[in-house]
Image: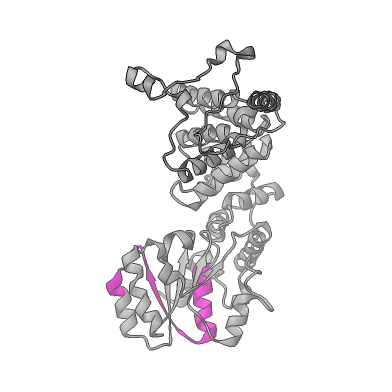
């Protein structure tokens, strides 16, 4: 096959692959005058480092160009198919002039990651690892301490449009899309430049202009970038939780639907909503817990997709409910007090005395039956005798807790009066 024919069959993404780091789009926070990576390239003195970013943001291309511009031999190993034996072959042939690019480095287990340490200590390689996962969670502390971490961003709309313009120049034709369909295509790429160019390569085969509806018939919708086992899973539930805590029903519903669209386990969301009801609303609106449990039960009864509406409803309920973490704070304070006070016994008047011996020992002595007291409140102390009275639960002035606060204030005054 001649060179012209080979070029004809090259994927569009490969044809548009940058030839120098300045051509890389969407990573201006790292590349450019005075930026971290550009300064290292100018100094031609590279540390080992990790490139952390989503698929299609240019990690592999960047590593290859860095090796080229610094004058290092470029070697690559994929953690998906390689092992320690492959790494050691590279180590044995390297003498400080090799940039070893390890794609999907998080796929190596902890023991396999240890294989890098001696090669790094001896300066035999410069390691550049690529990962879509948070390095703090997936890399050994020993390996991470020997590497800098550079975060690559998902490609935003401007960067994706730049790629489309470059593709049109290379192909010497415009994409057969209306303005609205072009915007839809950018959204479908979801920040992934490689996916965008793969879409474009298909679209260049067509001539008639397409609107958004016709586009989606040709390019089936891309699956959302969502993995229930990775950091994105926790990021989205965190966004949902904080939106509810921040009383923003619109944002809360958006993040809930992002998780639904990503295929999240609805039972996981239901459990988290129940937790939010007790952590962030509590006694400001005790009905919130019942609402969350009812929504969970409704989902279990209806299943998908009908059951999701019950969860959506409770998302909105929790978001607009009055907020209080007083019960949550009180629980943590009480737990700390319980741990620090040891095994102090309850006051003797609070103990039952079912036997004569226990009565003789003073169990239940001087106990005042609250129902026989005025207003059903005796004001007796129920903390251990040697433990000063603790103030643990401090209700807010929001929702039902405003009334609870008034009640506790009155009880406190009565208790102090009774103790005089």
Q: Residue 300 at what x, y percent from top left?
A: 44, 25
Question: Which residue does the image show at 30% across and 74% down from the upper left?
Answer: 86
Q: Quadrant of residue 126?
A: bottom left
Q: Residue 327 at what x, y percent from top left?
A: 58, 34
Q: Quadrant of residue 22?
A: bottom right
Q: Is residue 83 magenta?
A: yes
Q: Is residue 403 above or below residue 190?
A: above
Figure disc tally: 0
Question: Which residue does the image show at 51% across and 38% down from the upper left?
Answer: 386
Between 227 and 361, the residue placed more toward the observer is 361
Q: Is residue 26 left or right of residue 359?
A: right
For the rendered model, the colour scheme is one colour
Q: Residues in magenta?
A: 59-86
Between 97 and 142, the residue placed more toward the observer is 142
Question: Which residue does the image show at 55% across and 49% down from the upper left?
Answer: 235
Q: Is residue 345 magenta?
A: no
- Which residue in the rendered view is the most extreme toward the front? 360
| Residue 145 in sight here | yes
Q: Is residue 152 left or right of residue 180?
A: left
| Residue 317 in sight here | no
Q: Residue 135 at what x, y percent from top left?
A: 47, 63
Q: Residue 9 at what x, y percent from top left?
A: 47, 66
Q: Is residue 186 left or right of residue 220?
A: right
Q: Quadrant of residue 253?
A: top right
Q: Is residue 77 above or below residue 120?
A: above
Which quarter of the image is occupied by the C terminus? top right
Which quarter of the image is occupied by the N terminus? bottom left
- Which residue in the rendered view is the most extreme toward the left? 85
């Amino acid at each position: 096959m001649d060179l012209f024919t080979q070029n004809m069959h090259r994927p569009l993404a490969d044809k548009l692959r940058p030839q120098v780091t300045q051509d890389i789009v969407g990573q201006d926070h790292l590349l450019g005058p005075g930026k971290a990576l550009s300064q290292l390239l100018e100094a031609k003195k590279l540390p080992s480092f990790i490139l952390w970013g989503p698929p299609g943001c240019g990690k592999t291309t960047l590593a290859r160009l860095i090796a080229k511009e610094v004058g290092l031999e470029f070697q690559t190993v994929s953690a998906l198919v390689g092992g320690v034996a492959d790494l050691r072959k590279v180590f044995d042939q390297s003498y400080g002039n090799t940039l070893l690019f390890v794609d999907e480095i998080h796929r190596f287990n902890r023991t396999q990651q240890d294989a890098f340490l001696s090669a790094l200590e001896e300066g035999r390689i410069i390691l550049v690892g690529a990962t879509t996962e948070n390095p703090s969670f997936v890399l050994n502390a020993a390996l991470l301490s020997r590497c800098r971490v550079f975060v690559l961003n998902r490609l935003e709309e401007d960067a994706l449009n730049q790629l489309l313009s470059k593709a049109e120049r290379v192909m010497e034709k415009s994409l057969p899309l209306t303005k609205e369909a072009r915007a839809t295509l950018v959204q479908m790429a979801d920040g992934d430049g490689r996916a965008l160019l793969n879409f474009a390569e298909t679209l260049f085969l067509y001539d008639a202009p397409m609107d958004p509806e016709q586009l989606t018939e040709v390019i089936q919708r891309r699956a959302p970038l969502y993995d229930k086992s990775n950091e994105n899973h926790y990021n989205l539930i965190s966004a949902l939780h904080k939106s509810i805590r921040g009383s923003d029903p619109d944002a809360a519903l958006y993040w809930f639907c992002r998780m639904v669209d990503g295929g999240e386990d609805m039972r996981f969301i239901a459990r988290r909503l129940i937790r939010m009801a007790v952590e962030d609303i509590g006694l400001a609106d005790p009905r919130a817990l019942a609402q969350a449990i009812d929504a969970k039960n409704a989902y279990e009864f209806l299943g998908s997709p009908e059951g999701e509406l019950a969860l959506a409803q409770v998302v909105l309920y929790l978001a607009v409910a009055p907020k209080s973490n007083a019960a949550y704070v009180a629980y943590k304070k009480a737990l700390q007090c319980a741990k620090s006070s040891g095994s102090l016994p309850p006051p003797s008047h609070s103990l039952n005395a079912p036997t004569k011996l226990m009565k003789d020992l003073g169990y239940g002595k001087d106990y005042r039956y609250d129902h026989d007291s005025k207003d059903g409140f005796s004001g007796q102390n129920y903390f251990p005798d040697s433990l000063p009275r603790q103030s643990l639960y401090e209700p807010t002035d929001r929702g039902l807790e405003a009334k609870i606060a008034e009640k506790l204030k009155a009880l406190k005054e009565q208790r102090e009066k009774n103790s005089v």
